Image (cartoon, rainbow, N blue to C red):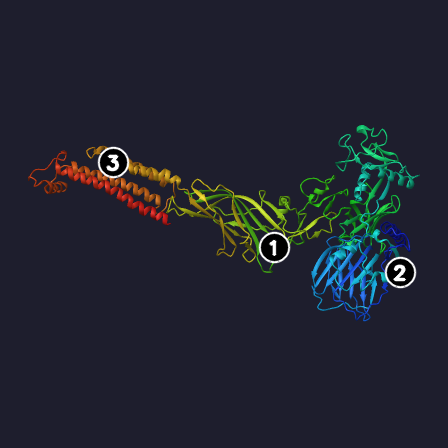
Amino acid sequence: MGGSVSLWAVVVIVVCSVHLQHPGRGAAGVQVLRFQEDRVATSHTQAWYKGKLEVSRQLASVTLCGRVFLFTLHTWATFIQLKNSKGERSILEGDIWLDRVRPVIAQNWNFQLLKKKLWVFRWHHLCFTYDAERHLLSTYVDGHLNSKQDVDFHDKYIAADGAVLGQGVDYMRSFSGNLTQVNVWDKPLSADEIRRLAKCEDDQQGNYISWNIGWTLQNVTSYEVPLTEICKQEADTRYFWFPSLTYNAALYLCRALGSSLPTGTNIDEVVNIATIAHSKFQYYQNCFTDFWIGPNDIKEEGVWMMYGVPIQDPIVWKASEPNGLQYENCGAIAPIGVSDLDCDTNLRCTVCSFKDFHRFSFVGTCESELRNVYYTAFQLDEEELMFMGYGAYHIKRLNGTWTWINVVTNETIAFMLESLPDFPMGRRWWQLEQPVCEQKEGDRWLLLSPCQAGYFTCNDATCIPLSYRCDLKYDCGDNSDEEECELVSFPDGYQKHLPPRSMDLEEAALSIVLTVIVESLAVKTIDMVMEVSYQLMLTWKDNRLLYQDLKVDSTLNVLPGDTMDKLWTPEVDFINTIKSEHTLMDGDSVMRVDRRATSIGMKPAVPREVELFSGDANTLTARRKYGTSFMCHLSLVLYPFDVQECVMHFRISSATKFFLLFNPNMSSVNISANRFLVEYEVGDLSLEHGGESQFSEVKVIVPLTRRSGYAILNIYLPTLVLLIVSYVTLFIRPAIIDVRMTSALTVQLVIATLFSQVSASLPKTSYFKMVDLWLIFCISITFLTIIFHVVVDNVMHGEPSPSGSTVWVNSLAKSKLGPVVPGHTAPATTPSVPGREVVGKRVVIATKVMVPAVFIIFNSCYWGYIMSQ
């Protein structure tokens, strides 16, 4: 324990010398107070305000600002606390975590989440303002507005007679780090004033607590530092040095540390590295002469590339270099320039450059607090690399083995097993000595990652965007980004046969969205069947599940078959089918997860960056193509001018309406098929929800309008022509009775044949169809025409008889020509009889008028009825 504290003190001195750059006591600047330099939690490090505070002075509005530089977090850090003589605490308090802060004002605790997490060994400027008139609490980090919150403190005031820095309620909440410029105002500062303070453009002092008035120190170290040094945006370049490595090991090491090998393109950098190395390694493994650079021309001779990208500036080569052709594809820095070397057979020293301290994450440890996850890399001596946690943990080499230890309790948690390269960065096997994630012993994968938020860490510690993980293509050099890409995390006790319950209401039914996409459609009128090829999609939520690494593109979230088999899926029956059919989950089914919400965090128990998504906010969609014959009850009364309505009837059979219900608002039907069928034109499809069943039902209504062009061209138009031909026979000379009768009979036979063909192509119904009426009418009117031909022929050329027509003709003749001689009749074949000729002409005229009249009357009724429907 003592050795760790001493080492930590050395680290703090090194870090602070870099960040503070203090010129020594008495130099012009601001006072910096250093608390718990050894990082040991204690209640004896504090600083009391020297100014006078009175309880009688009450603050309604307030601004608290301070600049903090964290060494570690014990639990959380309270950097200031105002008290009064009555013993009341938390009159005004500033609490810090890594991902949140908490301004405590008049004993009101209000968490504020941070948009960017705080770092250790880095200055942060924090401000909390409360505007009593607007009831507005605001948080600023490094001069930028972080959050606003409407808060009403109900006329509570801040009234204190003392202020202390560095201590909270107990010592585990004490502050470890540097503090400066802690001020309090009795008003809310403006955003511009806070920005100027954060950027060191102003050093405004508080009118309630002023930093410059001073502090009484207890076990606290004080320095004065130039304000400009605190606000430096870029620190000087620092280097980690490692001797005797191959090129690939050196490349891995620097990238795994979040750094890079030198480019060798900057003469100042080359000279500076050679100079520093000569002073550090003058008698050590020739590291003062050769250091690997990052670029190589392994892929293409003469084209020097760094991490797959050609470098822009020329390398600072030594004289006569490069000279190794395709046999020497890597480079190393020497005191007078860069020389090319063989990558595989040479061992050279390694230097990794840093502009700032890098933050590492130890993933797979199930730690909930970020202070136990985050680490910073340090190197005090050559090869002596260590990782110091933001909290109580360290990772360092002990007796030649990388060890994960708790420096507060001085307990070893795990040893890293032998690995090449022998560094802990990346995904490694560790031997547990303490329980981790409920695992008490054995080997466990753990990940020490240099990657920041939004990136995935490959096994070799290289970083790729998190969206590249499990995207069906390799992005990591070791292909580890496509390993263990399970999309669904099942809870213990998941039961496939039980449907999930809705989270909206305890007793509410689970909503299932039905989507039907009709791809092709055919109607067989004679069989009264509608054959449909369609995509059927069911979408629902299963709040029992957690999803992993979901992509915005849902095609990348398709579940494998073995996962589908483990999931509950709704079953839907197709009601009006010829056979008993229902939805299937087989090899033709596709199930995917649709990302509807953002991640709820990372999975803490796995050694990789695995984003978790809630099953209650993201949906499952099962899709399958079906070819189904639906029975269709067609009413053919108006055929071929009928409008039909066929139905695709679906019913959830997995559970009753109490548990499962089709969503009436989000369910939909679409058609991508050709709307113009052989006989019908398909209208706009719609959904009809409801039904008297105890199960949820929905009907897809398919409106069909008969395309009557075929019937008009093949039935009505030919029959109309035939009717005209039949009517024209009335204009043939009555004397040619054979031609008149033959033509009329032929027309009737053709229409009768057409009637038979049409009837055979339609279902046999017990009711008349409009086309039947039309054809029967056509047959009837041709029959009437034949009758007219017979009547005309008999009137004009028939045999005489004592009764019947002869008597009738004689009477007509008597009325027109005078009395007829008894016992004499005119022969039927004698056209010259004046009486018969006149009567015959009148009968012919009557037939020519009667046929059109009947046709017009029928068509008026026929088409009027059709148009009215």
Classify 10 Å Cα crowding around label 1: few (below 14), some (14-19), many (20 and above): many
Above or below, comparing residue 842 to residue 165 in the picture = above
Residue at the disc numbered 3: 729
Furthest residue to the right?
Answer: 283
Q: Which mark is residue 457?
A: none
Q: CA distance from mark 3 to mark 2?
A: 131 Å
> SS class of the residue under badge 2?
loop
Crowd tier of the residue under label 3, counting other residues whose Cα lies within 10 Å: few below 14, some 14–19, many 20 or above: many
Can you tell which of label 1 and label 3 is closer to the viewer?
3
- The residue indicated by pointer 1 is 500
Q: Position of residue 90 (x, y in %)?
A: 78, 65
Distance from disc 2 to disc 1, alpha carbons, whole Å, reads: 60 Å
Q: Mark 2 and 1 residues: CB-CB less than 8 Å, in contact?
A: no
Going from N to C along the chain, the mark reached first, 3 or 2, is 2
Q: Is residue 42 left or right of residue 682?
A: right
Per the image, the residue denoted by label 2 is 219
Q: Amino acid at mark 1?
A: Pro
The residue nearer to you, when weighing 393 against 60, is 60
SS for tag 1? loop
| Residue 431 x, y percent position in the rendering | 80, 48
Q: Nearer the viewer, residue 146 or 603?
A: 146
Residue at 75%, 68% (x, y): give it. Answer: 157
x then y, percent, for residue 81: 80, 64
Task: Tell us which disc is closer to us: 3 or 2.
Answer: 2
Lower position in the chain sequence, tag 2 or tag 1: 2
User: Which of pointers 2 and 1 indicates the residue nearer the eye?
Assistant: 2
Q: Is residue 763 above or below residue 390?
A: above
Inspect the image, locate mark 3, and give the three-letter code of the amino acid beneath it: Thr
Q: Nearer the viewer, residue 321 or 135?
A: 135
Tag 2: amino acid: Asn
Q: Dot 2: within a 10 Å radius of its alpha carbon, few (fewer than 14), some, or many (20 or more) residues? A: few
